[in-house]
């Protein structure tokens, strides 16, 4: 496995590779969320604005990189299951639009996202013969994933990171809504 393979959308990615990279992406996203919370603007001086713009630019670049890697490995995992990767994009669009339009039941779309992640993590291809997306890839980190329970531990860590990130985002959103209501109340 080459580092540049993390950024490619073909040929295929096995379960272990998907679970490992997904857990790393979830951890990276969680770290970015926490950094964004720590460095959010607390003062309105020009130095604070410039500093926050620089931090936001770094966070944007890191977030786009993590999203690209996550999207690429998800595409390749879909290819391993002999399905086009565009189905994954369709799932992301449904989750994003649904959680925005149906804000009161956002948790349902979080569960849908976890379900898709579990499907891609646990589903094994029906056979290990070459499919239309190429031949099967070599084992991903065979020394690590040969040990009993490592796959389950990495999968559980990815799910935990995802749940923590969802919880933090909902707490931040609730805080933002409360601050908006206080501001609206004070202006009238």
Image (tube, rainbow, N blue to C red):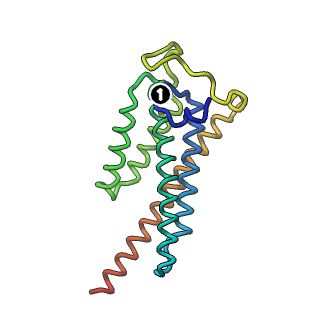
Q: Quadrant of the N terminus?
A: top right
Look at 42% across and 68% down and name the residue there: 174
The secondary structure type at the circle numbered 1 is loop
In this rendering, position of residue 28 left or right of residue 82: right
In this rendering, position of residue 100 left or right of residue 12: left
Please identify the quarter of the rendering in which residue 34 is found. bottom right
> At which x and y percent is residue 36?
52, 64
Front one among 161 and 7: 7
Taking the view exactly as shown, the residue that stands out farthest to the left is 188
> At which x and y percent is residue 160?
57, 49
Above or below, 29 against 6 in this view is below
Above or below, 12 against 31 in this view is above
Above or below, 124 against 102 in this view is above
Front one among 137 and 88: 137
Q: Mark 1 sits on what residue?
A: 10
> At which x and y percent is residue 65?
50, 47
Look at 45% across and 16% down and name the residue there: 131
> At which x and y percent is residue 59?
51, 58
Please identify the quarter of the rendering in which residue 101 is found. bottom left
Look at 46% across and 32% down and name the residue there: 9
């Amino acid at each position: 496995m080459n580092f540049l393979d993390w950024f490619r959308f073909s040929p295929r990615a096995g379960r272990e590779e998907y679970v490992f990279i997904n857990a790393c992406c979830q951890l990276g996203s969680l770290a970015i969320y926490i950094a964004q919370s720590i460095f959010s603007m607390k003062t309105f001086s020009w130095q604070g604005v410039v500093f926050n713009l620089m931090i936001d630019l770094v966070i944007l670049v890191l977030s786009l990189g993590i999203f690209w890697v996550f999207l690429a490995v998800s595409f390749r995992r879909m290819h391993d299951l002999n399905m086009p990767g565009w189905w994954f994009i369709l799932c992301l669009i449904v989750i994003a639009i649904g959680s925005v339009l149906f804000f009161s039941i956002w948790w349902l779309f979080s569960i849908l996202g976890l379900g898709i992640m579990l499907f891609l993590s646990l589903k094994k291809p029906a056979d290990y013969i070459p499919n239309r997306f190429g031949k099967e890839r070599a084992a991903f980190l065979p020394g690590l994933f040969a040990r009993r329970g490592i796959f389950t531990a990495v999968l559980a860590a990815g799910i935990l990171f995802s749940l923590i990130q969802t919880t933090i985002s909902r707490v931040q959103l609730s805080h933002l809504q409360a601050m908006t209501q206080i501001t609206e109340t004070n202006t009238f």
